[in-house]
Image (tube, rainbow, N blue to C red):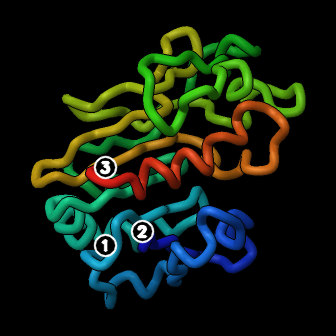
């Protein structure tokens, strides 16, 4: 079972009602996190829209979850780091399309078959996917970069104890679920990665 932390009902992703997510994801209000046994969940999904002050207050609980082998998927600009080694969001420098261009830095199952061009542009406009980075700690695997400096927009960190942190410094990865481009692969491939045996 996966856990989606909901802050506002209006932000609920449509993917939760469709295969392969339907019936496999439990939704819980973010402010109920303190009463949850996170060990019940294979992965926890945090959307762009959430109360980072509260998440920071639950940092020890989240760290213990990762240390126990859980997976956390974080979307958004990190303002209040809630785990050791995390740092606040850094925007891409420069202007124009090049400051927003996404570059593949390493292969990863979530991004398989998704072109950097389809992440850079959505409906002909650049910048929807991400505009900077949540700086990665040492040892993180850099997946996608943005801008001329290829700031690490997406990265994965193996947590001591077997957990995984997938960090995306932009809009929710599942926002592309109904796109006609290759970016539509993100949501189902994220699900497959989170639920894969041994993964």
Q: Depth-wise, is mark 3 or mark 2 nearer the camera? A: 3
Q: In this view, does 174 lie above or below 126?
A: below
Per the model, the C-alpha gap separating discs 3 and 2 is 30 Å
Q: Depth-wise, is mark 3 or mark 1 nearer the camera? A: 3
30 sits to left or right of 18: left
Residue 117 in percent (x, y) is at 71, 19
Pointer 3 or 2: first along the chain: 2
Q: Regarding mark 1 in the picture, which secondary structure is present there? A: helix
Q: Regarding mark 2 in the picture, which secondary structure is present there? A: helix
Among all residues in the image, which is located at the extreme bottom?
35
For mark 2, what is the residue?
53
- Mark 1: give few (<14), some (14-19) or many (20+) Cα within 10 Å: few
Residue 20 in percent (x, y) is at 61, 62
Pointer 3 or 1: first along the chain: 1
**Quadrant in which the N terminus is drawn:** bottom left
Task: State how many labels appear.
Answer: 3
Per the model, the C-alpha gap separating discs 3 and 1 is 28 Å
Residue 9 in percent (x, y) is at 69, 79
- The image quadrant that residue 12 belongs to is bottom right
Q: Specify the label residue 199 is tagged with.
A: 3
Residue 175 in percent (x, y) is at 71, 50
For mark 1, what is the residue?
57
Instruction: Name the residue located 59 percent from the left edge and 42 percent from the top edge.
Output: 170
Q: Specify the label residue 4 is tagged with.
A: none
């Amino acid at each position: 079972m996966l856990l989606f932390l909901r802050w506002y009902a209006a932000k609920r992703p449509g993917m939760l009602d469709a295969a392969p997510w339907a019936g496999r994801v439990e939704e819980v209000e973010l402010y109920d996190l303190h009463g949850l046994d996170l060990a019940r969940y294979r992965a926890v999904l945090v959307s762009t829209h959430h109360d980072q002050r509260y998440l920071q207050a639950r940092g020890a609980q989240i760290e213990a979850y990762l240390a126990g082998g859980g997976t956390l998927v974080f979307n958004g600009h990190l303002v209040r780091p809630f785990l050791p080694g995390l740092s606040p969001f850094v925007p891409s420098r420069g202007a124009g399309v090049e400051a927003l261009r996404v570059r593949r830095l390493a292969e990863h199952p979530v991004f398989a078959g998704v072109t950097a061009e389809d992440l850079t542009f959505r409906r002909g406009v650049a910048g929807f996917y991400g505009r900077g980075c949540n700086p990665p700690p040492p040892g993180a695997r850099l997946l996608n970069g943005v801008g001329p400096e290829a700031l690490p927009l997406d990265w994965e960190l193996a947590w001591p104890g077997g957990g995984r942190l997938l960090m995306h410094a932009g809009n929710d990865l599942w926002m592309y679920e109904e796109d006609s481009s290759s970016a539509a692969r993100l949501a189902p491939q994220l699900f497959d990665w989170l639920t894969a045996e041994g993964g």
